[in-house]
Image (cartoon, helix red, strand yellow):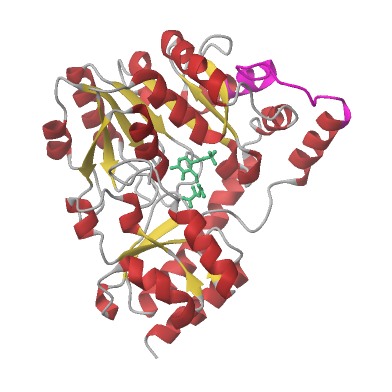
Amino acid sequence: LLSDDGAVAQTIFAEMTVLANRTGAINLGQGFPDVDGPGAIKEAAKAAIDAGRNQYAPGDGVPELRRAVADHQRRRYGLDVDPDTEVLVTTGATEALTASILALAGPGDEVVTLEPFYDSHAAAIAMAGATHVPVPLTAEGLRLDAAALRAAVSPRTRMIVVNTPHNPTGTVLTRAELEQVAAVAREADAVVLTDEVYEHLVYDDAVHVPLATLPGMAGRTLTVSSSGKTFSLTGWKVGWVHGPAPLITAVRTVKQFLSYSSGAPFQPAIAGALADEETPRALAASLASRRDLLCDGLEAAGFDVVRPQGTYFVIADGAPLGFDDGHELCRRLPDLAGVVGVPVSAFCRAGSTAAESMRSRVRFTFVKRQDVLADAVGRLARLTS
Ligand code: PMP
Ligand code: GLN
């Protein structure tokens, strides 16, 4: 453990993936697809390698990718982003998030997140030496508790971290919920760091609303996304952050000393991919049916499930099956059912209200092939037989 609150320790994903590999169980723990993204994008990276784009890329990213990010944000959301001063390419969303937090928060500052939270958010806050103030989502519907958010901010609040669509719950924050976040941020004069890596992966009638599109918010918002989820290329680690030039300058300054620059041949390949609307649309459509397959199977096996409207994760409650401790259930699941999940408590601060209300819940991913999910569902049925 590198931090007192346990935020900087071995990630739960590494632990559960090792467990899956050791036991041969189906890994529905770590969220990565078992089918790679489009061949054309891979060919574009190979072509970039063959064309000699193998030395350091510019620190802020190759111009065509910065332009492609700005074009994507304008086309989809009507956001006006200057590719030269307001975009920074990073080594995955992870580096964008960590560099942003290190750049803007330090000892004495408070950083508010929702809880459960994506684990790297908490680790970055701890590495910055700032104080993490988590705000629990409602235990029932897993939604924003605006009153709790309002109560959590103080004159020391430097930053509010939002993640929508939200990992691990799959909650997609509505415009009304985001307006409540925006109002609190404006009142507290806080920067908002918004993690939108699942922006394309929304289902049913849910709509992804970037926080930066709300009135008055572009000037105080850092928006993070990544190509990993959108194009099923999680190993390429091409991400980005955009926002007002002075904030991006601060984040760029930190990024210089985390990685200096990011994978050169992957950047032009992703620049080309970002113009493609069809690949993410088709992925979302196929994920919606895979979500239903897994959720139906979990329900049939006796779990309580909150059907997610975004991401590729679902939270299932083991309490109706008599499992009160999700971590314990995850350790035993390979033996009991040949499946691996991740305990939701890993996305909570130890001992917090959310950790308590999430205690018996487990996160499973549905970004696996239909036949793999069908196999997993069959295995999970063993829990009740
Ligand atoms: N934020 C969230 C909410 C995530 O789920 C993930 C990864 N799955 C990341 C950030 C990290 O993205 P990347 O792999 O691009 O670093
Ligand atoms: N973000 C992925 C998840 O939530 C995993 C990323 C990782 O292993 N760090 O499962």
What's drawn in magenta, residue-wise? 50-69
Q: Main secondary structure of the magenta part?
A: loop
Residue closest to the far bottom: 385
Residue 140 visible to the viewer = no
Residue 275 image point, x, y percent:
65, 30
Horizontal side of residue 41 vs 198, given as left or right: right
Horizontal side of residue 54 vs 140, given as left or right: right
How many numbered marks are there? Answer: 0
Q: Nearer the viewer, residue 68 or 355?
A: 355
Residue 1 image point, x, y percent:
37, 47
Occupied quadrant, residue 304: bottom left
Q: Nearer the viewer, residue 219 or 56?
A: 56
Occupied quadrant, residue 146: top left
- Residue 272 part of the magenta-drawn span: no
Horizontal side of residue 238 vs 212, given as left or right: right
- Residue 66 part of the magenta-drawn span: yes
The answer to whether residue 281 is above or below residue 82 is below
The answer to whether residue 26 is above or below residue 15 is below
Residue 372 image point, x, y percent:
59, 70
> Residue drawn at (46%, 25%), measured in percent from left and top?
99
Quadrant location of the C terminus in the rendered image: bottom left
The answer to whether residue 286 is above or below residue 251 is below
> Residue drawn at (64%, 27%), measured in percent from left and top?
262
Residue 12 image point, x, y percent:
44, 55
Q: Nearer the viewer, residue 143 or 281?
A: 143
Horizontal side of residue 137 vs 124, given as left or right: left
Residue 66 visible to the viewer = yes
> Residue drawn at (25%, 25%), measured in percent from left and top?
182
